[in-house]
Image (tube, rainbow, N blue to C red):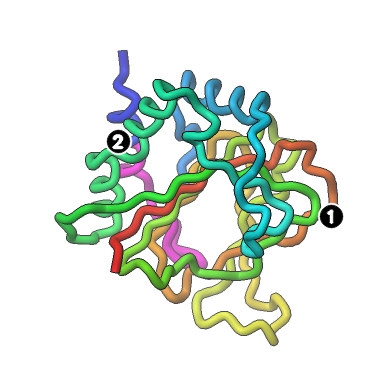
């Protein structure tokens, strides 16, 4: 039987880097099948109130801490996959970051609704020295394929350009992982949703970082 943790680390460390418009990793069929079924069921059945009502960074999005949604055993299993030292160090090694200290991880379940958007941003945080972001798309089907993450050309983002620096949009399909080391030029965002998402625009979002 495959070890799920080893499976994830191998996929991540061997994933090719896409270089346009800047370096990022895209891994399809990322989560082990059993865990994918589990997390899809959590999204489909969970009624936990979101904990971001006052967070203007995520308009029309429901953000929930996974430990509030899962049982103790489920959360322990999830933590073993994403928050253990082996996986954290794998991410940093993949991006050439030399660091032997403690790596923090912020982890949330996102359920985005009609009206959701994200202006271009680079995910650099004031509280962190090094940051690696990872998002795992968890829709139940490909009906929202066109509502993925949009990427902008390298360079300093200028709002006055009115989107002319837009490069491409990553398809929002089940079990796709998008990850990158956050740099001043890693501009990305999400265009405003003009249609109902029917509770399908779901994802796991993780931020791995070294505190300042």
Name the residue furthest right: 195
Say above or below: 161 vs 6. below
Secondary element under disc 2, as helix, strand or loop, is helix
> Where is residue 33 shown, x and y percent of the image?
48, 21
Mark closer to the observer (2, 1):
1
Residue 11 magenta-drawn? yes
Q: Which mark is residue 35?
A: none
Q: Which mark is residue 10?
A: 2
Say above or below: 89 vs 37. below
Locate residue 35 relative to residue 152 in the image: left or right: left
Instruction: Pick whichever, 184 or 78, lies toward us.
Output: 78
- Name the residue rendered at 45%, 45% in the picture: 107
The N terminus lies in quadrant: top left
Q: Which residues are magenta?
A: 9-25
> Where is residue 143 shown, x and y percent of the image?
75, 37
Secondary element under disc 1, as helix, strand or loop, is loop
Name the residue furthest top: 1
- Name the residue rendered at 71%, 36% in the picture: 200
Residue 135 magenta-drawn? no
Instruction: Pick whichever, 16 or 25, lies toward us.
Output: 25
Q: Identify residue for label 1.
A: 194
Q: Tell me the quarter of the picture where residue 79 sits.
A: top left
């Amino acid at each position: 039987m495959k070890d799920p943790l080893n499976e994830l680390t191998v996929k991540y460390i061997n994933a090719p880097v896409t270089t346009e418009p800047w370096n990022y990793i895209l891994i399809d069929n990322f989560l082990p099948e059993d865990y994918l079924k589990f997390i899809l069921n959590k999204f489909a059945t969970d009624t936990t109130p979101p904990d971001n009502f006052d967070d203007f960074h995520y308009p029309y999005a429901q953000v929930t801490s996974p430990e509030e949604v899962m049982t103790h055993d489920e959360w322990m299993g999830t933590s073993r996959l994403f928050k253990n030292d082996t996986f954290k160090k794998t991410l940093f090694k993949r991006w050439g970051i030399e660091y032997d200290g403690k790596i923090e991880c912020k982890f949330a379940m996102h359920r985005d609704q009609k009206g959701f958007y994200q202006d271009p941003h680079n995910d650099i945080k004031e509280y962190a020295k090094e940051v690696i972001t990872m998002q795992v798309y968890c829709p139940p089907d490909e009906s929202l394929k066109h509502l993925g993450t949009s990427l902008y050309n390298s360079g300093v983002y200028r709002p006055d350009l009115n989107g002319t620096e837009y490069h491409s949009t990553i398809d929002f399909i089940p079990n796709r992982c998008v990850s990158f080391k956050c740099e001043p030029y890693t501009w990305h965002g999400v265009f405003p949703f003009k249609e109902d998402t029917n509770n399908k625009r779901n994802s796991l979002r993780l931020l791995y970082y070294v505190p300042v």
